[in-house]
Amino acid sequence: MKTHWALLSTLAGCLLFAANAHAAAVAVMPVQGVNLSEGQCDAIGAVFSSAYARDAHVAVASPADTKPVWSEVRASLATATRFGAAQYVELTAIRLGAKVTLAGVLHGGDGKEIYRAEASTPSLDEVDGAAARLARALIWRQPVLAATYPAAPQLVEGVPEAPPSPEVASPSLPGNMFGMKGIMAFPVASGRSFSPQIGFQFDARIGPRSYFMEIGAGLLAPTDDSPSTTALRTTAGFIELGGSSYLNDGPVGLYVGGGISPGLWRTETAYYDYSGGYSYSSNGSVSGAMIPIYAQLGLTFTRDIRTRIFAEFRASQHLLGLTDPQDNRTSYHPTVLALQMGVGW
C-alpha cells in the first residue's frame, strides 16, 4: 500500500498546483462608437470588461487586448479565436445629445448570437453604471432593469442584486479546462492475472461547449505490493491524445469519446529464489512500448461553473503485447477497464 499512498499524495499536490491554470473565457471587442471619441470608447470598453470579469468570475480579454488583433483581421470571431476565448462580446455606444446608449451582443465560439441587451444613461458621466448593468444582463441573460434618474446616488446603477452564487448560475463559461484526475485501472487478459493499478494524470480539455479535445500525461502503478503474488505487476507512463463530444447541453453533461494513449511499460513478477521465499529483482522485469486505444463514457457534474468535477468509465485495448518476465516468449494484450475522477478549472 506504500505505492497507493505515495500516488495519492502526489495527486493532491498536483491538484493544488493546477488550481491557478485556466484559460480566458470571454473576449470583448473594441467599442464601436457614434458621436464619441476613440478615448471615450476605450474607457467604456475597459469599464464593461472589468464589470464582466468581476460579476462572472471569468478571465476576460478587454478591448485594449483585442484591439490590435481586431484591427488586423477586422472580424470578431477570428479575433476571439486568436485569444482562445469560447465566447465574445460586441459593443456599440451611441451618443445623442447628452444621452448615451450601450448595446452588447454575446456570441458563442461558433459565432452564433447567444443574447443581446441595451442599457442607457442620461449623460456620459454615469456610463459606468450602464456598462455594469449591461454586463450583468449578458452574464445572466436577463433584460436590463431601467435606472431611475435623478435618484439618490447609490441608485444610479440600478443593478438587481445578484444570486447568492453567481458562478453557479452563469451559463457563459467555455469548455476549456485544465486539471488533474485520479485513476483506478483493472487489466484483464486471458491466461494471466494482472495486479490492479492506481494512477494520476494531468488533463487538459480544449474546445467549445459542445465538444473537447483531450491532452494528458500520467503514470499508472500496481497496487499489489505482496512479493508472493502471482499477478503480473505493470507500471506505465503515458501521454494521451483524444476527443469527446457532449450529448446534451445541460449543467450536468454526458459525453462519449475515444483516443490513443501511447507510452512505456515495465512488467514485474515474483520468483522463488530457493533461499527461503519469493522476491523481486532486476532479472524479474521486462520493459517495452505500448499503444492502447480507448473509448470512454463520462459525466461533467459541474459544467456551468469554473471548478468542474467529472467522472468517467474507460475501456482500453493494448495493441502491442506486454511480456511476462517469467517467459519472454509469452506476451499479452490486456483490456484495461478504468474508473477515473477529476477536477479542473
Image (spheres, rainbow, N blue to C red):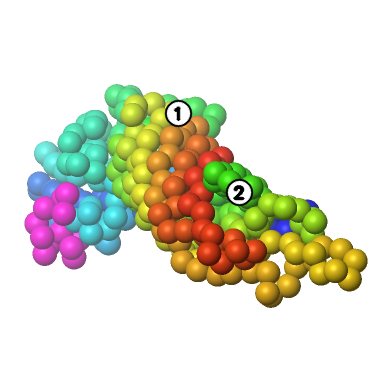
68 drawn magenta? yes
Residue 252 marker:
1
Q: Under tag 1, what secondary structure? A: loop
127 or 217, which lies in front? 217
If you read the primary sequence from the N terminus, does the residue marked by circle 2 or circle 1 appear first?
Answer: 2
Q: Is residue 8 visible?
A: no
Report the side of 148 relative to 252 (left or right): left
Q: Is residue 334 visible?
A: yes
In the displayed image of the protein, which residue is found farthest to the bottom? 282
Q: Using a 10 Å C-alpha cutoff, classify the residue at mark 1 as few (fewer than 14 neighbours), some (14 to 19) or many (20 or more).
A: some
The quadrant of the picture occupied by the N terminus is bottom right
Q: Which image quadrant is residue 127 in?
A: top left
Q: Say which residue appears at 81% left-offset and 69% top-offset.
A: 273
Q: Amino acid at mark 2?
A: Arg
292 or 247, which lies in front? 292
Q: How many marks?
A: 2
User: Residue 184, position in %: x, y?
Assistant: 61, 45
Mark 2 lies on residue: 192
Q: Under tag 2, what secondary structure? A: loop
User: Residue 297, position in %: x, y?
Assistant: 43, 35
Report the side of 238 relative to 148 (left or right): right
